[in-house]
Amino acid sequence: GHSAGLPPKFALMATKSAAELQLGGFVRESIKGKIHKVQSHHANAYSLRIESIRIGDSYDTAEELLNFAQNAKQKYVPALIDTMQACVTLPDGINGGQLVSSPYELYHDRGAPWRSMFITVEGVSEGLELRYEDLLVEHQTFLDQAWGTSVRPCVMP
């Protein structure tokens, strides 16, 4: 059985400088704003269905990266929630014909600067906004000298 009869749940709250993992449920007083509950769609992992990923200055003007084919059987891509990963990983293909183009290629080929990434999860009416500066991490690669910096947003295929 579970301690105190609680179902197996957890809450993860994070900012750029701090994080808190609460096991067995959550303490409502530790949360500012709305709580969004989302069902996992996989029995052995924390998996969500992502319906939209947009990048730009505002949600309304942002470029959509998940362009679903007209005959797509599903209008989402699965996403694993990995609390040990500091990066956003985008699909780097057309997902078996479900997508018109590779979201990572659209992101990579986008020449314009952007301020935020907006992610819409199935079952949540308002999207999650990730600011550009919150995705910045230091990379140590051979490209540092060519790009003039080792600090870039952590978005990868």
Image (cartoon, rainbow, N blue to C red):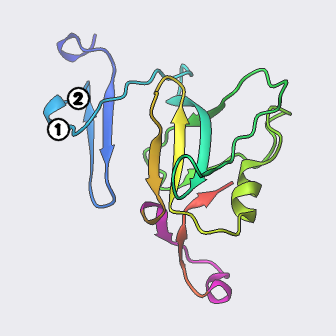
Q: Residue at x 31, y 14 (%)?
A: 7
Q: CA distance from mark 1 to mark 2?
A: 8 Å
What range is drawn magenta here?
134-147
* On screen, residue 5 above or below 8: above
Find numbered disc 1 in the image and state the secondary structure of the residue it sits on.
helix
Q: Residue at x 49, y 22 (%)?
A: 123
Residue type at numbered disc 2 = Phe
Residue drawn at x 83%, y 40% as measured from the top left: 100
Q: Quadrant of residue 42?
A: top right
Question: At x 78% / y 48%, what residue is drawn?
Answer: 102
Residue at the disc numbered 2:
26
Say whether marks 1 and 2 touch (CB < 8 Å).
Answer: yes
Determine crowd level at label 2: few under 14, some 14-19, many 20+ residues with C-alpha closer than 10 A.
Answer: some
| Magenta region includes residue 136 | yes
Tell me if residue 120 comes above or below residue 106 in the rendering: above
Check the picture and name the quadrant holding the C terminus: bottom right
Amino acid type for the residue under numbered disc 1: Ser
Q: Which residue is mark 1?
A: 30
Query: Is residue 11 within the magenta segment?
Result: no
Q: Quadrant of residue 150?
A: bottom right
Label 1 vs label 2, nearer the camera: 1
Q: Residue 16, which numbered label? A: none
Q: Position of residue 11 (x, y in %)?
A: 31, 33
Q: Residue furthest left?
A: 29
| Location of residue 73 by image quarter | top right
Between residue 89 and residue 70, name the one nearer to us: 70
Q: Quadrant location of the N terminus?
A: top left
- As displayed, is residue 101 above or below residue 6? below
Q: Position of residue 41 (x, y in %)?
A: 55, 21
In the picture, measured across the screen, residue 25 lies left or right of residue 136, that is left
Secondary structure at numbered mark 2: loop
Rendered view: 25 above or below 2: below
